[in-house]
Image (cartoon, rainbow, N blue to C red):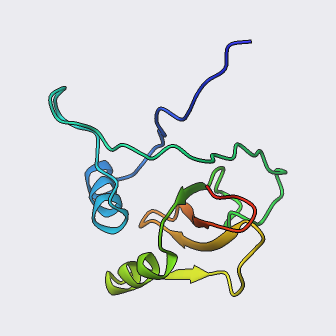
Amino acid sequence: MEKVDGVGGFFFRAKDTAKLAKWYEDNLGIKGVPSDYDTPPWRTNAGTTVFAPFKEDTDYFGDMKNQWMINFRVKDMDAMVAQLRANGVEVKPYPEETPNGRFAHLNDPEGNPIELWEPGGKDPG
């Protein structure tokens, strides 16, 4: 069976696309879509990617209007949390490490939920 070998993009609606793209670049280092084919796009490191549908009544994503939540792998949770807070972003780290690493939650300026994951324990990422 032929299988996909990774995520090639994440596409979603936004009220202000330029402002939101800049927020992601300024706070999380995610480059926006290049305006030409000579500029390299954002590249990720290969690693664990979880594809997990949740029950429709989950409160894990926060507000029930949120249909998705993206999870980004990070190398240093403490440094990322400090960076976000220095930029005025509210971020809530999990109080304890889980068997597969450390997690934190935040929202982008349009209220979309984001989970950060520093792999560890049973999953090296």
Residue at screen point 42% across, 80% down: 79
Looking at the picture, does residue 119 appear above or below residue 10?
below
- The residue closer to the viewer here, 25 or 14, is 25
Residue 95, picture quadrant: bottom right
Residue at screen point 14% across, 28% down: 38
- The residue closer to the viewer here, 22 or 100, is 100
Q: Position of residue 11 (x, y in %)?
A: 47, 38
Q: Position of residue 103 (x, y in %)?
A: 63, 72
Residue at screen point 34% across, 68% down: 27
Looking at the picture, does residue 32 appear above or below residue 6?
below
Looking at the picture, does residue 95 appear above or below residue 6?
below
Looking at the picture, does residue 39 appear above or below residue 25?
above
Residue 60, picture quadrant: bottom right
Counting every numbered tag in the picture gives 0
Residue at screen point 78% across, 70% down: 99
Quarter of the figure with the N terminus: top right
Relative horizontal placement of residue 108, taking residue 32 as reference (left or right): right
Q: Position of residue 17 (x, y in %)?
A: 32, 49
Relative horizontal placement of residue 70, taking residue 16 as reference (left or right): right
Q: Position of residue 61 (x, y in %)?
A: 68, 63
Residue 43, picture quadrant: top left
Q: Residue furthest top?
A: 1
- The residue closer to the viewer here, 58 or 117, is 117
Quarter of the figure with the C terminus: bottom right
